[in-house]
Amino acid sequence: MTTTNQHSADAAALGFLYQGQYAILMLWRETDDEATIYLETLDDVVLVTTGGTLLEQLKHSLQAKPPALTVASVQLWKTLKAWIDVLPELDLPRSWFHLVSVADISDGSSLEVLLDDTADRTALLFDLQEEAERVENERAQALAQGKAQLPHAERAAACQAFLALHNDVKRSLLMHVRIRPRQPNITKVEEVLAETLTTTIRSRRAQVARKLLEWWNIQIIDLLAKKRKLGISRFELIKRYMEIVSAIELDELTSEFSTAIHPSSYQCDSMIERQISAVGGSVEDLKRAVREEWRAREERSRWSRENPARHEIIARYDDRLVEEWSDRHVDICNDCSGASEDVLKTRGLNLLRWSHSSAPKDMEPIAPKIVSPYYVRGTYQVLSISGQVGWHPNYKKLLGFAS
């Protein structure tokens, strides 16, 4: 069911996600190699450079034409309140404040001076002072009239905080404030990032941008989850960019699913469970198999989507894995001639566990950068679905693969 609350939650969630997405544009455009990005500290996004600190307050919208900014805009006053609150923690002469908005500035508004670093802010200061006083007066009048709900509730605290500042502080603050209107919304960030990757040939910019954002989003999650103590540096971003470009230029296979967790709703092919059940495998054997099969399957799919020609590399490596398995399977079949079912299961279970523990060490990797064991482990499970490999000595007959 679609409700107003749901739309409100969606907008808030997108606004929060936008902070992390916009941050990569900020850091990429920065020229200071020592620059570092932080989220949800002094402001939505904070950029620290050798020259000072930049606080960015982001106002997101998916509307084609969101309401233009004026000196009466709630967004503006909420932003001013956020900055006023952290002034005691800042060295104001070395701090800058950006209001980043998808919306435009209203034509003729005194806010337009905030587009120019050197423009005189006197008229803007007067307009803001006048607007704050108007809000205060109208609330006082409503209170005197005994009204239960006072007007301008969303701006009241901000206007009060602004009026409480010394005039010199107001002027100093405004000299360090900028507005960045008409910024791309969250649906356009990847496209904008791709266009800025001018050192990459145009035909590959979209691919590089997608990979860079995939890496970036993981860093943002780690940052917000406090898994990393420091912010994200420009050096890290440039380093990752160069690695991605290099891998694409060389068409190298890279890993993105080595530690990924499959969705809780994921249902593996039933043949995996049947293969493991045939040798008396445990619940843990099945859990490991499902986890690694999903990782390998997703990796194989990604490689093929990026470059269909890679299918041949994948197929050749499958053949190599089948060959290595086949030598062992033939040996256990020969050794188990006339043996009991318990012995057959035990030998098959050992082979299954070899595919998980020893095979990744026994086999050369599919590519130099695929060093994690997940791919060999998972690919053996993928191959077991079609019967190209199996664990029980008689798996083809037991599971219906025999012709």
Image: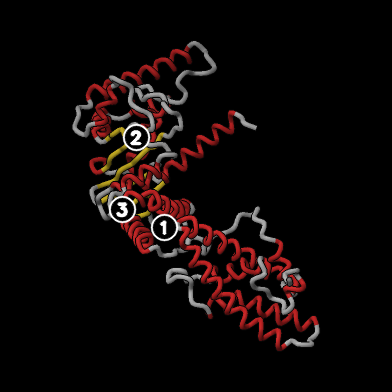
Is residue 84 something one can see in this rendering? no
Using residue 352 as the reference point, say whether residue 366 is left or right of it: left
Q: Residues within 10 Å of mark 2 (few under 14, many from 20)?
A: some
Measure the alpha-carbon separation of dots 2 and 1. 27 Å
Q: Is residue 342 above or below residue 84?
A: below
Callout 2: SS = strand
Classify the position of the C terminus by image quarter: bottom right
Residues under numbered marks 2 and 3 in contact, where contact means CB atoms less than 8 Å apart: no
Q: Residues within 10 Å of mark 3 (few under 14, many from 20)?
A: some
Q: Which disc number belongs to residue 229?
A: 1
- Quadrant of the rendered image containing residue 7: top right
Residue 219 position, x and y percent, is: 43, 54
Q: Earlier in the sequence, mark 1 or mark 3?
A: 3
At x 44% / y 39%, what residue is drawn? 187
Amino acid type for the residue under numbered disc 3: Thr
Q: Which disc number belongs to residue 99?
A: 2
At x 27% / y 44%, what residue is drawn? 91
Depth check: give the residue in front, 329 or 36: 329
Callout 3: SS = loop
- Quadrant of the rendered image containing residue 241: bottom left
| Badge nearest the viewer, 2 or 3 | 3
At x 47% / y 52%, what residue is drawn? 221
At x 57% / y 61%, what residue is drawn? 297
Measure the alpha-carbon separation of dots 1 and 3. 32 Å
Amino acid type for the residue under numbered disc 1: Lys
Which residue is tagged 3? Answer: 200
Measure the alpha-carbon separation of dots 2 and 3. 31 Å
Q: Is residue 81 above or below residue 124?
A: below
Q: Earlier in the sequence, mark 2 or mark 1?
A: 2
